[in-house]
Amino acid sequence: MNKSKKIPDFKNEDEEREFWAESDSTEFIDWGKAKPITFSKLKPSTKTISLRIPEFMLDEIRLIANKRDIPYQSLIKLFLKQRIDEELKY
């Protein structure tokens, strides 16, 4: 399928976001010609939060992280991601 419509010029990201939320991209882009790429330096946006947990839990997390030779905050994120993935499986 050839792309039949020209992608409009957008004034800002909000306008572009709204356009793509309401439009079918296959009318503008030939996805059959798409190739996978990797954005190796792209970091996901993060948000700092305050989390209160019992000291013994933090000590145990630090112990496990030390055994795995990773920062304890990275281990917490890993544990959370694994649990989230489990919960979201249907």
Image (cartoon, rainbow, N blue to C red):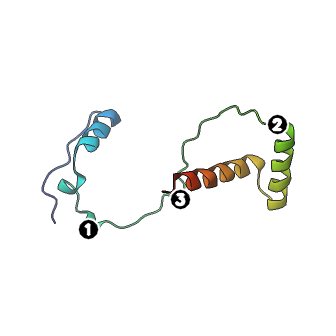
Q: What residue lies at 27% left-to-right and 33% top-to-bottom?
A: 11
Amino acid residing under circle 3: Ser
Q: In this view, does 87 lie to the left or right of 17?
A: right
Is there CB contact under 8 Å for labels 3 and 1? no
Relative to residue 79, is residue 57 drawn left or right? right
Element under disc 2: loop
- Cα distance between the residues tagged 3 and 2: 36 Å
Whether tag 3 and tag 2 are in contact, CB under 8 A, the answer is no
Find the distance from the CA under tag 3 to the CA under tag 1: 24 Å
Residue toward you, 79 or 43: 79
Residue 82, how many percent across, how many down?
62, 55
Q: Which residue is drawn at 16% across and 50% down?
A: 6
**What residue is shown with label 3?**
40
Q: How crowded is mark 1: few (under 14 residues within 10 Å), some or many (20 or more)?
A: few
The residue wearing badge 2 is 54
The residue labelled by disc 1 is 32
Displayed quadrant of residue 37: bottom left
Q: Which circle marks residue 67 in the picture? A: none
Residue 44: percent from left, percent from top: 54, 47
Residue placed most toward the observer, 51 or 37: 51
Q: Which mark is first along the chain, 2 or 1?
A: 1
Residue type at mark 1 is Gly
Give the SS element for disc 3.
loop
* Secondary structure category for the residue under label 1: helix
Residue 43, given in percent of the width and then of the height, sits at: 55, 49
- Judge depth for marks 3 and 2 and give the one in front: 2
Mark 2 crowdedness (10 Å alpha carbons): few <14, some 14-19, many ≥20: few
